[in-house]
Image (tube, rainbow, N blue to C red):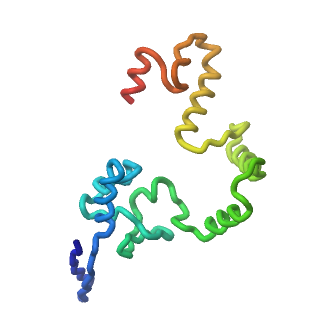
Amino acid sequence: MPREVTLKPSSRSYHVIKKNTGQQLYLKAKTRIPGGTQLLSKRPEMFLPEQWPSYYSRAQGAFVWDLDDQRYIDMSISGIGSCPLGFADPDVNAAVKAAIDAGSMATFNCPEEVQLAELLCELHPWAEMVRYARTGGEATAVAVRIARGIWRPICQNKMYSDVKDFCSRGSNLKAFRAS
């Protein structure tokens, strides 16, 4: 339902119609998506219940526009994490488009993975090698496997070999669930 808002910066009066299209779409999303969003951290109730715009039409730099074309400064979670260059940075976009045009996936490995590994080892002299992961869960599983590889010869028990790499038996599992 459209809502009228009158803003009075300095001595002038501006008349703005706010349609709340994002909230309307969010209500519809809640009928098809449990919780209304795919990520708990993006639920409108966390910010301004029944008024948060919820959806965006575009983003550039530090700004984001809602579905009603109202501009905001994204001072919250910058999408879903670190975004130091802002949204839609022209240099980053050009590099991504060039990579897509060159073919972003093939059976062979791309040379950039070696270049990045060399750069990371140069920036972090304590690191001898680099292993990439696609997700946080995958990175955690790799870290646990590395830790098991170091500690298994020392511990010499089967406590950590059950079900998943990051699960264990007994009291350790209770401690893991509590965290």
Q: How many numbered discs, if any?
A: 0
Q: Which residue lies at the image location 45% right of the left edge and 58% below the top edge?
A: 79
Q: Position of residue 41 (x, y in %)?
A: 38, 50
- Name the image quarter holding residue 165: top right
Q: Position of residue 2 (x, y in %)?
A: 23, 75
Examine the rendered structure and indicate whether residue 65 appears above or below residue 148: below
Is 147 positioned to the left or the right of 4 in the image?
right
Quadrant holding the C terminus = top left
Q: Which of the two residues, 137 or 102, is positioned nearer the viewer here? A: 102
Q: Which of the two residues, 31 or 37, is positioned nearer the viewer here? A: 31
Q: Which residue lies at the image location 31% right of the left edge and 57% below the top edge?
A: 44
Is 172 positioned to the left or the right of 143 in the image?
left
Examine the rendered structure and indicate whether residue 88 appears above or below residue 16: above
Name the outermost residue toward the bottom.
Answer: 12
Is 97 positioned to the left or the right of 165 in the image?
right
Is 106 positioned to the left or the right of 2 in the image?
right
Q: Which residue lies at the image location 31% right of the left edge and 54% below the top edge?
A: 30
Q: Position of residue 133 (x, y in %)?
A: 62, 42
Examine the rendered structure and indicate whether residue 34 appears above or below residue 68: above
Q: Position of residue 76 (x, y in %)?
A: 39, 59
Name the outermost residue toward the front.
Answer: 32
- Name the image quarter holding residue 126: top right
Q: Which residue lies at the image location 39% right of the left edge and 27% below the top edge?
A: 177
Quadrant holding the N terminus = bottom left
